[in-house]
Image: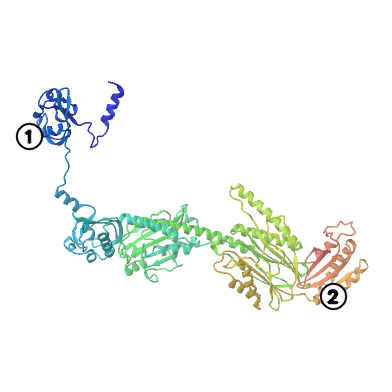
Amino acid sequence: MDPARQASDERTAARPHGVLDASTDAAAVVNAEGVVVGWTRGAETLLGHPASEVVGASAARLLAMPGDPARVAGVAERCRAGMGWSGLIPVRHRDGRPVDVDLRVSAAFRIGADECFLISGRAQRQTWTVGQSVLDGFLTRSPVGMAVVDLELRYVWLNDTLERFGGVPREQRLGRRLSELLPGLQAETIEGLMRKVLETGVPVTDYEYVGWSWADPHRQHAYSTSFFPLVDAGDCVTGVCYMVLDVTERWTARQLLAMVNEAGTRVGTTLDVMQTAQELADFAVPRFADFVIVDLLEPVLSTEEHGAWLTDAGPAPARPVMRRAGMKSVREGCPEAVARIGDRVDFLPPPHDADLLLHGDPVLVPVLDPSDDLWMTEQPERAASIREFGLHSLISVPMRARNTALGLTTFVRSLNPVSFQSDDALLARELVARAALCVDNARRYTREHAAAVTLQRSLLPHALSGGTALEVASSYLPADPTDGVGGDWFDVIPLSGARVGLVVGDVVGHGITAAATMGRLRTAVQTLADMEMPPDELLAHLDDLVLRLSAEKTDDETAHRTTATFLGATCLYAVYDPVTRRCTMARAGHPPPVVVSPDGQVSFPEPPAGPPLGLGGLAFEATEIELAENSLFGLYTDGLVEGADQDMERGMVRLGEVLARSDADLGALCSSAVRQLVPEPHPDDIALLLARTRALGADRVASWEVPVDPAAVADVRARATRQVEAWGLADLAMTTELIVSELVTNAIRYAASPIRLRLLRETRLTCEVADASSTAPRLRHARSTDEGGRGLFLVAQLSHRWGARYTAGGKIIWAEQEIP
């Protein structure tokens, strides 16, 4: 045989045969006399006769029925007319058994001179019929509840499953409606759906609902129901058939998943440990439990570093010290509780010890027995509460996150009659696990925030003094904890000549980095101010410092492969001179100061804004204004005036209105202004520095022009001595005489005219010598053979402090003495 043909035959044999596939039918050719002239293998397979036994013999002997010549003649006549014939004919198998065959006879055709007919057939396929008893058993015992109601929605039939679902006997159901039997099963809604099916003829499928039944009155079940109309032969609706499937497990799983997902949005909305614990208790009552307590270990609630026993590193103490952090009950006031929020507790369900917190699984107590010896011995108060309020089921779940034990959450049921099951314990574990992560996040954030606040407060000035030039008061308000500590700072810096420097600044960003940067900038301002730099130059040097800090931060972030961020700050620096009542100021991207004159007029003098610190390459400009005595001068950060509307101009107007209502007590005014202007919560740090100006009167200032003549030193020295004695400072007359002598002599010898001597009496006695030279003095140690060079060394020894500052016309050498 040809291999290709053989493969084709094998594929044909392997192909499944459809109902209309005639390739395997039995076939035979019979002539007009009824003699078989052709016989196929299909016929041999069907009837068992080989061709050698059949061909040449009469086909009539194959029939398993009496001969019917008339019928045979009618079939032959029909086929001769060109129409075939088909019918069911019983034939006899070779083994004698009858076979019903679907027989088809073709139209007549000729083979040579003979008239022939092609007869083909196949065994009739037996169809399976369902007996009434089988059908009744299927309907009655099906796991799906089924029922038929009439047009009045009265039961006319139901199966055993539906009877079991509802718990109402069949005899009581028949002839009555669902709403009359099971009012707790959304009966009215279900009947409304059945009426809709009767009216529209449109089925309703897979309607889910939850309810109670008499079969299980202590547990809520979920059902899925489908409704479809019943129609008669005339296509008229005669009733409704409905099928019910108990899907409680599926519904419960879906509800638990939904509850866990909802807990993720409801628990942990803040970075507060206590609030997070309370949110867990609030969420679980009453949807899961009737009474919930959340107890956290004391180190979790502390801002100090936690003890080593909190981790798996070592054994835990027998009775851990915890505090009640959250509590909720379906009963008003949580009367079941034996401890209140904040109280110390050591509750662990008997017989467990503290190892439960480190390694234990959730503890499930389906039935609480208050008379149990362990409860009576270890938890007598709680045993009494269990008895009094009917607490009957409990789950206690250890709270752990990141290998750290945090506490214990306990769920209790009392009014809900259903006891906790193992599935509930799994849900409780998941709820507590999510809450534990939030608690641990809050714990970590609280400690970092506390460290940042501590750092920030340590870097801010603890006491401010404006000397005789200013009365000062300040108010500082950290940002809301959720927004992190900011980098606001302020300072009051005493300067020479009774002057005072005032500074306020704001570092970009929040957290420990911002606080640390603030500390570095504050220290830099103090150093630069002590070098007697004017405001514009001071800001220029501060800008260079911020640029260097930004470069250091960028290098560090690059090393750690993180995104570099801009490190910047704003700042305003002002210097007030009580002798001239002039205030010189410059700012770097900071809001302008506020000035309230003695008559209550409010103004906001605006020196050129200047760029924020950290941009580099841009200049700063200084402005000078005159302040009347008893004027109010205020510096602040933007958080004070931004307000809820984020409108700084409107906020500045509000600030001016508040400060215009001048209070005799500057500290009270400062605190009141912050309270009135700052919303709660506030996302940024807030700093306000107020200063009330004073003037140094002429009776406290004495000055003389000094001729450029060494002989003038004696006269100037004498004048200074007389002035000091006139001020009642005779104890300082000798040292003042020496200081004046040395400073004036140096100016005459090394500097240029004009030369001027000034004495100031305030908290200290200050001696100033001004000249037109910009050459800086230098302190040096003279050799024993040198005739000079000891003047400044002598001044340094006699004075409290000394220094030099530059002016537009030269420089001033000054020295201060403490007044006894």
Quadrant of the image containing the N terminus: top left
What number is the disc on residue 70? Answer: 1
User: Sequence-wise, which precedes: disc 2 or disc 1?
Assistant: 1
The colour scheme applied to this rendered structure is rainbow
- Mark 2 and mark 1: Cα distance apart in space: 164 Å
What amino acid does circle 2 point to? Gln
Q: Is residue 341 left or right of residue 131?
A: right
Query: Label 2: how many residues lie within 10 Å, few (<14), some (14-19) or many (20+)?
Result: some
In this view, which residue lies farthest toward the front? Answer: 81
Q: Quadrant of residue 117?
A: top left
Q: Which kind of residue does numbered mark 1 sit on?
A: Ala
Could you tell me which secondary element the residue under label 1 belongs to? helix
Please identify the quarter of the rendering in which residue 665 is found. bottom right
The residue closer to the viewer here, 63 or 282, is 63
Q: Residue tagged by mark 2? A: 723
User: Is 315 in front, or is 788?
Assistant: 788
Image location of residue 680, percent across then percent down: 54, 68
The image quadrant where one finds the C terminus is bottom right
Relative to 420, does residue 54 appear above or below in the rendering? above
